[in-house]
Image (cartoon, helix red, strand yellow):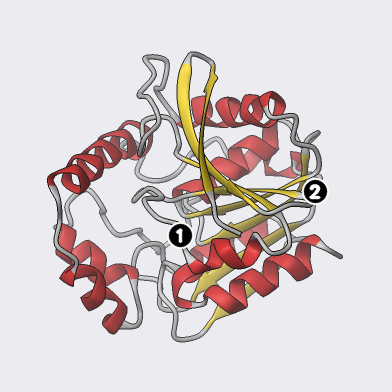
Amino acid sequence: MPFTDHFIEIDGCRTHYRRAGKGQPLVFLHGAGGAPQILPFMEQLAERFDVLVPDHPGYGQSDEPEWLENIHDVAYFYLDFLAALKLEKAVIVGTSMGGWMALEMAVRNTSRIAALVLVSPAGVRAEGAAPADIFLLSPEDMTRKLFYDQKIAEERLAVPMTPEMIDLQLKNRHTTARLAWEPRLHDPMLPKWLHRIDVPVAIVWGKEDQILPVAMAHELKRLLPKAELTIYERCGHLVVQEKARECSELVVRFACK
């Protein structure tokens, strides 16, 4: 079933999202690189769920609202997004920055959320495990660090960049800096409120993640002792691409318990 493009205005922000499938709603929250295309992982999930893939405020085809100052603003925005679209018992799947957003949403209100699947999420620090400084890496170095399988990195680097793609990259990087520059890629206040999350949580990580080291997975598991933890061997930061089938099967199994 093909994904279709939609726009909705929420909190004064014209927001772009793609949608496909039917059944229980599933909202996919993308990482710092945006969601410029529909991935096989999303298509597989659309066979079982009503999948929505929004561009965060300040990313992709969505507006850059004046009120966007920090990650908390995004959390409240997405709670309003669920309400505006009348989504109930939604599965929230967030990767990297999107996983951080999912956590921030859930400590505030889970009334419309059925479960969280956090794929290599930012948001929490781990002692002795510093994240890569994504603001200093060149685009080429960043691409190489995203994947364990360097053939995938080479294929991505071989795609010629259009002026439109460059503009979107700059827009996404600017918004990421607004949200995660200081402190870098985490919210020091988040750990003390994680106990408020009262829905099932799955944590998914690539063992060879060079952006957010796998030690962060174990720290998040310590903070969320009831969460299910899955670590994939021979996998980097972009688990939903390198382990697309395994990850989509995990989401289905976890959400349908």
Which residue is rendered at x = 69% and y = 39% of the image? 106
Q: In the rendered image of this protein, does residue 81 appear above or below residue 127?
A: above
**Is disc 1 placed on a helix, strand or loop?**
loop
* Rendered view: 65 above or below 198: above
Mark 1: give few (<14), some (14-19) or many (20+) Cα within 10 Å: few
Where does residue 3 sit, x and y in percent of width and height? 54, 51
**For this rendering, which residue is in front, 53 or 179?**
53
Q: Quadrant of residue 62?
A: top left
Three-letter amino acid code at disc 1?
Glu
* Residue in front for this viewpoint, 246 or 85: 85
In this rendering, would 198 be left or right of 231? right
Q: CA distance from mark 1 to mark 2?
A: 27 Å
Residue 77, placed above or below residue 184 = above
The residue depicted at 45 percent of the width and 36 percent of the height is: 56
User: Does dot 2 land on a helix, a strand or a loop?
Assistant: loop
Given the current orientation, which residue lies at the most extreme right position?
A: 257
Residue 215 position in % (x across, y down): 49, 68
- The residue identified by callout 2 is 199
In this picture, residue 254 sits left or right of residue 4? right
Give the quadrant of the C terminus. Answer: bottom right
The residue wearing badge 1 is: 127
Q: Is residue 66 left or right of residue 25?
A: left
